[in-house]
Each structure stands twice: as C-alpha cells, then as structure tokens.
Image: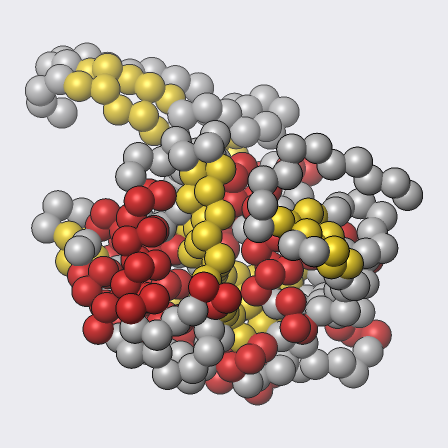
C-alpha cells in the first residue's frame, strides 16, 4: 500500500459473521494503524464470532428463516432472520410485521458491528407487559453491496443506485413470502419498515414509495446527506394514505437533526400532518447502536400504538405507557417535564 495515513479496521474471513473477538469472545475496539511505505502490521486474532458459541445473545424466539434467500431483482442471496412473538407456536393469532434493515445488528452481539439493538429482548419485555406481539423480519445487509442497495440514488463518491431494486425485492418477493408462510396481518395498517443510517434512508424510501403496502416508517439517524434527491423525493411524492413516521436524531450527529427537519417540512407541504410525524432528538445522541437500541421500544410503541394492548394513561398533555408495567415506563409530554415521580 503506497502513501501514508491512518485506517481503522477489524479482521474477518469475509463477513461480519466471523469478525474477530477478544480472548473471552468479548467485543473489541477497532484496530488502528498508521501506515507508510514499507511498513508491516502484525497482530494476533484471539477469537472469531462464528466460533464463540457462548457469545450469542439472541433470544430463542429468533430463528433463521433462510440462510440463502434469493433476491431475483438483484440476482443475489441474503440471510433472513425472524423474531416471532413468544406465543407464536402456542396460539393461532396473526401478527403485525415490521421489516428491518441490517439484521446483523438487530438481535445478536456476536454478529453486530458496534453492538446490537436488542430488538428481541425489548419486544419480549413489552410482550410480558401486555403487547400483542409483532413479527420482525431482519434482512441482512449485503456488506460490500450495502451502500449500493440502501440508496436508489448515486453518490459520486460513495456509490448507491440499487435501492429501487432492493425496495422491489422487499415488496415483490420477501413480503409475499412472509405473508404466505407465516401468520401475519398483511394489510398496510399492520406493516412497517425501519432502519438506521443508510438503512434509515432506504426505509424512508420504501415506506414513502409504497404507501399502499406500508403505513409505518422508523427513520433512525438517516444519512440524508447522501443525496439531495431525498428532499426532492419527499417534495414530489404525493400523500396517498395516512402514515406514521418516527424520526430519531442525535445532537452529536453532524447535521442530521437539521436534515430531518428539512425533510419533515417537505412532507408537511405534501399534505402530511403533525399527528403523522414524530421527531425525537437527544442532545447527547450519537450515530451509534446504543442510541438506536435505547429508543427502539418507544418508537415501536408509537408506530404500532393501535395494534398493541398496552394501556395508556393520559392526563392533560402527558401520556404514560405501558400501564401497568413491570420493567419499563415511558412518559411523553408536549411540554418540558422537569420532575417526574412515579408511585407503584
């Protein structure tokens, strides 16, 4: 390698499923190497995710739907994981469905990049508190194809351009398969899509493009900087149905908060209302899995409010849910809350 500079990296055998781990199968920080002409880097790899059986953190109700699910629109194969509600096999219920990007980071620390979302643990806890349950379809990102697949528009520096085909795969191939083989509530009122970063971009595009299929979109830390076409797309895509869109951005993410507000302004001009859009910002929020993990339960409850059985106590402009709860309580208010005291 010629020239000089600093790179951050981890060792894999080709995929994040076998990324290197520490001596006790723990997550390790990125390696950092400043290179120059003639330099040689030597390191020891102690463990890898695929041999650290004890490091898997996914719940038993997360299953592998298919290790090599064919994507005809892109002529590729992809691993698909499912989260099934705890009572899926003991009931005849049908469930709403949420399609999520970057499955590597959703359920299992051993396959995540920088930590997992803990989607399975969060939903199991909500189920114990009375939520009716939801099927999560975790679509593995294409790693080297991720950037191309997660944007329908090209960034001259970074790539993109295959997002339209990826969206067609979700709508025309994957969703019909899920609805045919699992007990789903297949109508748009019970179907959502969510993602973060570039996954937030493609989720926004999929939900807005296919409003007849999706009624809920979770847009976490979206990389709207990738292309100005997203703002144009928001302005020029007319509202066809009522939607619920949950935006999340951290104050430490450079420019993300303002980009989200720009997109929201465009959506309001096309006919969406403030009741259909929720924008949450955290002043200390970073572009990181810890932020998305922390905020996922609240986003899910807001998006699927009409589909769950959690009681919600409302007084004036304050909403507290779920009620009752054994583990988590959320307090929403249109006004700033300075002090909260909760009694059992």
Q: Where is residue 336 in the image (x, y as percent from the top left)?
A: 58, 40
Nearest the viewer among 293 and 183 is 293
State left or right for residue 37 relative to residue 276: left
State left or right for residue 188 relative to residue 319: left
Q: Where is residue 271 in the image (x, y as percent from the top left)?
A: 35, 74
State left or right for residue 218 relative to residue 134: left
Q: Quadrant location of residue 211?
A: bottom left
Residue, x 49% and y 47% (percent of image)?
Answer: 280
Asked whether residue 183 appears in the rendered view, the answer is: yes
Colour scheme employed for the rendering of this structure: secondary structure
Nearest the viewer among 126 and 32 is 126
Q: Where is residue 158 in the image (x, y as percent from the top left)?
A: 18, 47
Above or below 263: residue 177: below
Above or below 320: residue 245: below
Q: Where is residue 188 in the image (x, y as percent from the top left)?
A: 51, 81
Residue, x 39% and y 71% (percent of image)?
Answer: 272
Q: In which quarter of the image is the C terminus?
A: top right
Nearest the viewer among 208 and 65 is 208
Above or below 158: residue 283: above
């Amino acid at each position: 390698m010629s020239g000089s500079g600093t790179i951050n990296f981890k060792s894999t055998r080709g995929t994040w499923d076998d990324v290197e781990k520490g001596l006790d199968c723990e997550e390790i920080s990125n390696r950092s190497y400043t290179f120059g002409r003639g330099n040689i880097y030597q390191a020891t790899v102690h463990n890898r995710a695929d041999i650290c059986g004890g490091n898997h953190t996914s719940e038993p109700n997360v299953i592998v739907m298919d290790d090599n699910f064919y994507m005809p629109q892109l002529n590729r194969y992809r691993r698909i994981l499912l989260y099934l509600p705890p009572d899926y096999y003991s009931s005849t219920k049908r469930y709403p469905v949420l399609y999520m990007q970057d499955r590597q980071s959703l359920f299992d620390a051993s396959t995540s990049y920088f930590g997992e979302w803990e989607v399975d643990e969060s939903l199991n806890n909500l189920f114990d508190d009375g939520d009716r349950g939801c099927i999560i379809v975790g679509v593995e990102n294409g790693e080297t194809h991720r950037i191309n697949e997660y944007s329908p528009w090209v960034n001259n520096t970074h790539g993109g351009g295959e997002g339209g085909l990826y969206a067609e795969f979700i709508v025309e191939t994957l969703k019909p398969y899920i609805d045919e083989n699992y007990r789903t509530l297949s109508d748009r009122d019970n179907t959502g899509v969510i993602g973060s970063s570039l996954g937030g971009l493609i989720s926004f595009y999929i939900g807005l493009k296919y409003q007849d299929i999706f009624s809920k979109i979770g847009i976490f830390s979206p990389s709207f900087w990738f292309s100005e076409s997203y703002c144009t797309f928001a302005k020029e895509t007319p509202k066809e149905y009522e939607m619920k869109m949950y935006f999340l951005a951290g104050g430490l993410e450079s420019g993300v908060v303002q980009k989200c507000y720009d997109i929201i302004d465009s959506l309001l001009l096309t006919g969406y209302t403030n009741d259909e859009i929720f924008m949450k910002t955290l002043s200390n929020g970073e572009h990181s899995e810890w932020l998305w993990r922390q905020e996922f339960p609240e986003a899910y409850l807001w998006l699927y409010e009409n589909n769950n059985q959690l009681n919600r106590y409302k007084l004036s402009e304050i909403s507290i849910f779920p009620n009752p709860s054994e583990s988590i309580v959320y307090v929403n208010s249109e006004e700033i809350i300075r002090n909260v005291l909760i009694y059992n």
